[in-house]
Image (cartoon, coloured by chain):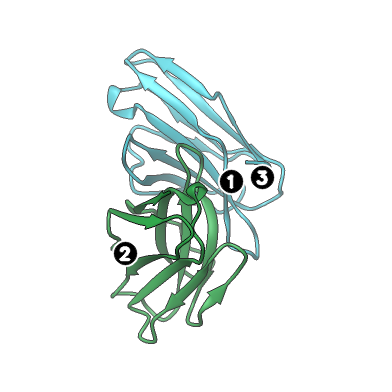
Amino acid sequence: NAGVTQTPKFQVLKTGQSMTLQCAQDMNHNSMYWYRQDPGMGLRLIYYSASEGTTDKGEVPNGYNVSRLNKREFSLRLESAAPSQTSVYFCAIEGTGNEKLFFGSGTQLSVL
Amino acid sequence: DAKTTQPPSMDCAEGRAANLPCNHSTISGNEYVYWYRQIHSQGPQYIIHGLKNNETNEMASLIITEDRKSSTLILPHATLRDTAVYYCIVREGNFNKFYFGSGTKLNVKP
C-alpha cells in the first residue's frame, strides 16, 4: 500500500454523527478514487476525481461528499452517518501512463 | 463501460494452473480488459490488462478471444497464497472510471 495513506484505520460512529475519511498520496498522480466494500461483496465506486479541483459521482454517491483541494489529498465526508454506511472504505490512485490502480489499506467504519 | 460476468467461486489444486474465465460480450473496440485480485481484506492488487492481444507478465497470462467477448486469466502454478477474489473489469481508454463487480473467489487447495 506504499504511496497511499488512509486515516483513520478504524472508526465507530453513532447514527447522525459526521466524520471525514482522509486519503493522501505521495506518487503525484492525477486520478483518485473512493470505494466502499460491504461484507462479502465487491467494491462499489463512491466518487472519483480526475484531477485537482474536479470530482465526479460513482455508483453509490448518496450520503457522501468529497473534496479534492490539492493534488495530494482526496477526502470523503459523511455528514450524517447511517448504519447502512457501515463498510470498509478504500482510497485508490491511478498511475499516469501505466493505468494501474494502487489502493490504500482501507478504513473500517461501523455506524451504530 | 461493458458489464462483465464471472463465476462466483472456483477451486484449484496447488501447483496446477488456475484458469479464471470472464465474459464481456458487450465490450466495445476501445475498451481494455483488466484483472485485479483482493487477498483477504487488503486493497485490490493489479495483475494484468490487455486490449486485443494476449498478455503475459510475472504474475499471470491474459488470453482474450478473437472476438473479444471473453477472456481468461491464467495463473500457471497456483499456490496457497493465490487464494483471493479475482476481479475482471473492462474500461474505456485511460479516462473512464474503474468499476468492480463481484469477482471470482479462487480457493487454492493443498
Chain assigned green: B
Q: Amino acid at mark 3?
A: Lys
Taking the spot 71% from the left edge, 49% from the top edge, the residue there is A28
The Cα–Cα distance between marks 2 and 1, rounded to whole angstroms, is: 31 Å
Q: Amino acid at mark 1?
A: Gly
Residue occupied by mark 3 = A71
Q: Earlier in the sequence, mark 1 or mark 3?
A: 1
Above or below A61: residue A86? above
Element carrying mark 3: loop
Taking the spot 46% from the left edge, 57% from the top edge, the residue there is B97
Whether residue A85 appears in this view of the structure is yes
Q: Quadrant of residue A3?
A: top right
Q: Position of residue B79 (x, y in %)?
A: 50, 53
The number of numbered badges drawn on the structure is 3
Above or below A109: residue A90? below
**Residues at marks 1 and 3 on the same chain:** yes
Residue occupied by mark 2 = B4
Task: Say if mark 1 contacts mark 3, CB within 8 Å.
Answer: no
Residue at the top extreme of this rendering: A14
Residue occupied by mark 1 = A53
Taking the spot 28% from the left edge, 75% from the top edge, the residue there is B25
Chain assigned cyan: A
Q: Is residue B94 left or right of residue B107?
A: right
Element carrying mark 2: loop
Q: Chain of mark 3?
A: A
Q: Quadrant of the N terminus of chain A?
A: top right
Element carrying mark 1: loop
The Cα–Cα distance between marks 3 and 2, rounded to whole angstroms, is: 32 Å
Q: Position of residue A103 (x, y in %)?
A: 56, 44
Q: Position of residue B44 (x, y in %)?
A: 50, 47
Q: Is residue B55 left or right of residue B27?
A: right
